[in-house]
Amino acid sequence: DALMCEMTLDTSTVNSLSQMLIQQYTYELVVDGLPTRLFLGTADLGSTLTMHSGAADTSSTASTASDAASSLLLFTHLHFEIAVNKDRRIVEVAVKPKKPVPLPSARAVSKSSASGSNAEAVASFGDGNIAEFMIAFTYSVEWVEKDVKYSTRHQKYYEAFEVDDLELHWNSIIHASMTVLVVAAFFSFLILRIVRKDFMEHERMQKAGRSGGATSLDNGAADEAGGAAELEFGWKLVRGDVFRPPHNVLLLSAMVGVGVQLLILTAFLLMLGVFDVFHPLNNGALVTCTVVSYSFTAGLSGYVSGSVYKQMEGKQWMRNAVLAAVLFCGPVFVILALVNAVSMLFMESARIIPLWSVLVVLVLWALVTFPLTIIGSIFGRNATKVFRPPCHVNNVPRPIPQVEWYRRPAVMAAMSGIVPFITIYLELYYVLQTIWGHKVFSLFEVLALVFFMLLLVVSITTISSVYFQLVVEDYRWHWSSFFYGGAVAMYIFVYSFAFLVKSGSAAGSTVTVHLLHIFAYASILSLVFFLMFGSVGFFCVKLFVHFVFSNLKSD
């Protein structure tokens, strides 16, 4: 055995390690590009744990926090079993933690300094007579030969971290898929049937009005206007205002453009994942590909925002282009800069983003993202014709009547996000476990399927919500459709925040850093979903409204 290092443990360190062992903290070692994940120890006496090449085999479960105080074991020896092929290239790495040392309970201590073997240190610490003791961490290496090709050594990393959960994972996804399809079919059938019934009723009343008018031509202009008003009911009353441009067109068009860019970017990354471009050996490949792809797809946000802005009769197109360029990058940069500053203040070096990486991203934004957004906005503005609404827009806006509290846009937005969140909450759990936990995610096919289902559900729920809003004569569908579609982001933020708080722990001065990181990354994730699916809801409702009012016959 070779000595790796020696570490002095005091009362504070023992408390931190005890919490980590109870919550089953893991760490990762990388040998020749092959990652291995290990537990710090175990919270159950007599348990053994072996983890190799991204897979774990635990023979016993962790005990509860109440009885773990006397059975917390810290592994102090790592045995590396490194396999090489005939070409003397490393093809497999297995790490077996050994020599578990019991952590003493953090009782009142008075003296200082301790030395000697781990056993002697633990024994003296357990008597409560010293304030700290020293633990020696050692390692050993065993070389074996295996007939494995170097090009195929990564195949085992495609398996899930816990293989036993794979079947349950697929069964849950299939169950959620069937549930979503049933809900989507129900909403589609309901809305289509109601709209069709409204059209038939409108045509019937028009025929009745024309036949009645033929027998009473001398009733005068007043009676004619009154008869026309009687033909209109529900959502048909707002056809003179439904195509009125909304307030704050500049911001809305920029949000729609950035949302479309994020949607296409997400679909592109999922496609790469389906084709096995991202696997566990590509450390950081997903992050790098995301940043670069976002920069080179910036022209999409400029094009869409410029096109929508012109259709809504916007005039300040340069401000619109600049806003589209900074709308997403700006908040993300501010959030990460704040996290970096707080991490540096509390000396949390593991959480600090390197300055070199920050400079590279800034240069990439200045030289690629910003110019492409401006160019895309110019093309979008020039390629888009002025929007001609199928219905005449009244000069004076129609007053919006008061409605019940549960039919107000804020309440309807909260309800619109429930069904989409149910669609993805299980898959979101696995994704969060991959990012913050010890799982390895490789089922990009399932993730792509769930993403497609989410698009379908968001489209239908948003159209349904806007229809019920138009029924109560509220024609402000532009902003409402965006918030209805992006409402799922609110539930994603709450779920992500709760998941990260539950999965992590912090003590002392690190509480602020820990909570700030949780809030920051949950905010970024929810912002992506809000912009992405808000734009989906906007365009779906736009097509729905145009279709419905274009087919509305009038005298």
Image: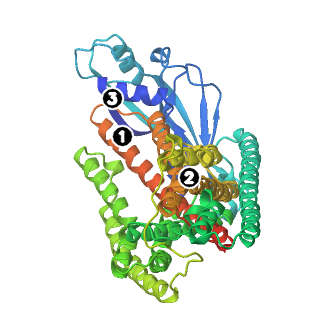
Quadrant occupied by the C terminus: bottom right
Picture coordinates of residue 545 (x, y %)? 61, 67
Q: At label 3, which amino acid type do we have?
A: Thr
Q: Which residue is mark 3?
A: 13
Q: At label 2, which amino acid type do we have?
A: Val
Of labels 3 and 2, earlier in sequence is 3
**Residue farthest to the bottom?**
382
Examine the image and state in which quarter residue 295 appears. Answer: bottom left
**Residue farthest to the front?**
218
Q: Which residue is pictured at 53% across the width and 69% down the height?
A: 240
Picture coordinates of residue 489 (x, y %)? 50, 51
Secondary-structure class at tag 3: helix
Secondary-structure class at tag 2: loop
Give the number of the disc on residue 472.
2
Q: Which residue is mark 1?
A: 515
Mark 2 → mark 1, Cα distance in angstroms: 43 Å
Labels in figure, total: 3
Q: Is residue 534 above or below residue 190?
A: below
Q: Is residue 523 left or right of residue 261?
A: left
